[in-house]
Amino acid sequence: MGEVTARDAVVAAYHDERLRVLATLIRLTGDWQLAEECVQDAFETALVRWPDEGVPRRPGAWLTTTARNRALDRLRRGSVEAAKLKEMEAAAMPAGDGEGPDDDRLRLIFTCCHPALPFEARVALTLRTVAGLTTEDIAQAFLTPVATMGQRIVRAKRKIQEAGIPYRVPPPDLLPERLAGVLAVIYLLFNAGYGGRGELADEAIRLGRLLERLMPTETEVRGLLALMLLHHSRAAARTDETGTLVPLERQDRTRWRHELIDEAGRLLTGTATPYQLQAAIAACHADAATPGETDWGRIAGLYERLAAVAPSPFVQLNRAVAVAMAEGPPAGLALVDALESTGALAGYHLLPATRADLLRRLGRHGEAAVSYERALALAPTEAERRYLRRRLDEARAGS
Amino acid sequence: MKYLMLVCVDEDVERDADPTPWIEEMDGRGVRLAGNRLRPVRDSTTVRRRNGEVLVADGPFAETKEQIGGFDILECADLDEAIEVASKHPAAEFGTLELRPLWEDWPWER
């Protein structure tokens, strides 16, 4: 075995096995810091030994055993009571390389997303521990000082140990609620990536795919993955060469990634649950070869079902858009005005932007311009402001 | 793991919430080691020592909407069990229950 191939094997094992080895070590030791250090040690040992001894038949098992022995050594030398050592020696090693409900990676994911941790710490810990990003990368992605992000992660790990947060997949009575929490973390990562930090969207999809492999019967896991894939399939078509946002109806649909759309299609179950419904809506757009072929009646119906299971003013706004497309702008405008009178979306730029768009389609350019101005003042990103400015100019020219 | 569960409620609001069934259930399960109600905040006294001088004052240190109205010491397998126990306390409906892990190796523990 040449040194180069052995080194490649270690790199490959780091990519494929790091998470599984780490997740098992945390279960065996109950000590996150010790586990991380021993896993790092095991990979360094592999770099030294694999070139001479050859790459083991099951690299993951080799790395887990090596890291475990290292942890036992360190604990023996430390002041750990004999009882705790015995417990660790007796703890079960993973049965194989298969994937199932008794996977340490699932335990790790659920523990990182435990509701007793602050939400931003769940996000940071998931990226650091599950996705394996460096603290520096995470800090940069969230525009947070590295020291602050490091402290957030350290505090979260400390609380897991000191407050007795269990390292497990929650039992059936807690699972729906806890799984929703895990999905919320992944979806936040995806949206942070969608907002310009692309590498986070890729991580979110990677996590979504892992979770889907580990929990293949959970419809909402499939729903979230489908939703992310469908949004991601349009990533290249969402902005033009100047960085301006291109709305769905003007996107070049040949630039949509159809392999992602197909993958998403296989994940749809038709269940009336929030992520499945949102994915079904996104699929309606993906399935239309041209904007004119979009089944807006079906989309409006899906939004109505979504509003029933997950009430939200944002859903109502989207429903108004779909109704306007299916039945004409007046019907949509009535829903937008009703929503505006509740004050639930005050300060949200897409409310006046939607209103402006409907007014423009009705030829009421003067009123449209007023609403575009309000939307422009509230829009959070430069891409959106650029788009709104263009529309405002058009409305002013038309009036 | 041992947890101190602080029962925080607005003591100015009269509540018809008898914790007896909860106490009986949790004593029966062996997760409740001790606990009691506290007299109202008006009977509270704060004590500090600064530069050797003992400073005694009336009332609680901070003005908050909810006051500690009682406490329980819980012995639970983990935080999830403590959350489950706390969520069943009648005050969870209208007040806040705070779970604080105790130091495990406190040498004077009884």
Image (tube, coloured by chain):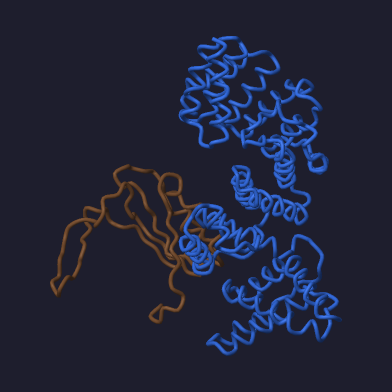
Chain colours: A blue, B brown
From the top left corner, tell me how far across and down residue A290 is, in percent. Answer: 79, 25
Depth order, front residue of A21/A116: A21
Tell me if B18 is positioned left or right of A105 in this view. Answer: left
Depth order, front residue of A168/A306: A306
Depth order, front residue of A168/B6: A168
* Residue found 27% across the figure and 53% down from its top: B40
Tell me if A240 is positioned left or right of A143 in this view. Answer: right
* Residue found 86% across the figure and 77% down from its top: A57
Query: Which image quadrant for residue A35?
Result: bottom right
Compared with A239, B103 (above or below) is: below
From the top left corner, tell me how far across and down residue B9 is, in percent. Answer: 36, 49
Compared with A332, A30 (above or below) is: below
From the top left corner, tell me how far across and down residue A379 is, in percent. Answer: 51, 32
Residue B110: tell me if it is visible. no
Q: Which residue lies furthest to the left in this view?
A: B53
Q: Which quadrant does the C terminus of chain B fall into?
A: bottom left
Tell me if A375 is positioned left or right of B37 in this view. Answer: right
Query: Which image quadrant for residue B34?
Result: bottom left
Q: Residue furthest bottom?
A: A77
Residue A223: tell me if it is visible. yes
Compared with A67, A176 (above or below) is: above
Tell me if A374 is positioned left or right of A295 in this view. Answer: left
Query: Which image quadrant for residue A207?
Result: bottom right
From the top left corner, tell me how far across and down residue A65 is, in percent. Answer: 73, 80
